[in-house]
Amino acid sequence: MRIAVFGTGGVGGYFGGRLAKAGEEVHFIARGEHLQAIQARGLRVDSIAGDFVVDPALASDDPSQFGIVDVVLVAVKTWDVPQAALAMRPLIGDQTFVIPLENGVEAPEQLAAVLGVEHVLGGLCQISAFITGPGHIRHVGIEPFVAFGELEARQSQRAERLLQAFQVAGVKATIPPDIRVAMWDKFLFIATASGIGALTRAPAGIYRSLSETRQMLVAAFKEIVALAKARGVMFPEDAVEKRLAFVDSLPAGTMASMQRDILEGKPSELDSQSGAVVRMGAELGVPTPVHAFIYSSLLPQEMRARGTLTF
């Protein structure tokens, strides 16, 4: 398959790199020193599942250089999705489909608004990986996993074809019965863990073990379950228990990407995670006091990181 990876950070670099090492034609969209290093030395991935290097790697900051592809994997930060949708137009042909591997639940609609709903599937991934230097990705935790599927919860040959490519690459992948439920299930975890981790400035091993922050974790989970139900997304009855068990299974030092960004004083996905919960809750009349507290508490730091507030 001809695959474009739009955003070669921890997510795009790892999954795109695995596909490239398996023989797929992968084109990486990157920028700056990271792009220059990939072009000069290839893409290096250090992983708890085995290190590898993609060299040479097909990389550019100009999507028009690559032409039409079969699939675009979108792995930019959530706030960049609308702009990325505009920039990827040269990659899109009649049969091209686009899969967002974002942390939020709003990306499919944002992509469809620009590219057309017929080109967009739902998607998600699980991995703890990040750029550790130009051209260098480090995967430090969580078994890499990707899921995707048609937004109408139907089977399709195009999704099956990509599934086979991931399986050949040795990546755990699946097409769930309903990708929207799967995306909300991930959102249940990531929005809660990111927010509480950033607020407490502590890794998973700490906030899951203290009774006070564990109670906050459970309450935040329940708010998102209630919100999902109000939007017609039906979680299984044990959704909170399963996600709590997942948090308990994480390495003690695990930190979500939003949490790392906030702790490092960088712009983060606060608006599309905690902020999205608060916005959707207000629209639907679903109380979200825990997420509202998290969002309001972290907002000054976010505004400072984005240069809209000085202190």
Image (cartoon, rainbow, N blue to C red):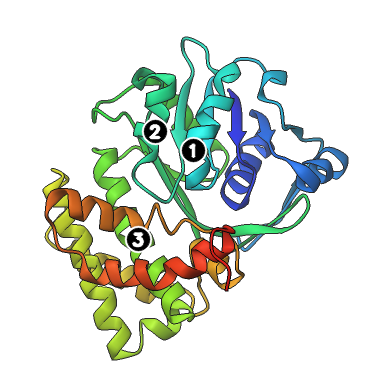
Tell me which amino acid carries mark 2. Answer: Gln
Q: Please give the count of numbered marks on the rendered protein.
A: 3
Q: Nearer the viewer, residue 162 or 66?
A: 66
Could you tell me which secondary element the residue under label 2 belongs to? helix
Circle 1 residue: 81
Mark 2 or mark 3, earlier in chain: 2
Residue located 67% across and 29% down the image: 27
Tell me which amino acid carries mark 3. Answer: Ser
Circle 3 residue: 274
Residue located 13% across and 43% down the image: 232
Residue 204 placement (x, y as % from top left): 44, 77
- Label 1 crowd (10 A; few <14 / some 14-19 / many >=20): many
Q: How many angstroms separate mark 2 from mark 1 (CA)?
A: 7 Å
Residue 110's label in the rendered image is: 2
Residue reaching furthest right? Answer: 40
Q: Quadrant of residue 291?
A: bottom left
| Relative side of 4 to 66, left or right | left
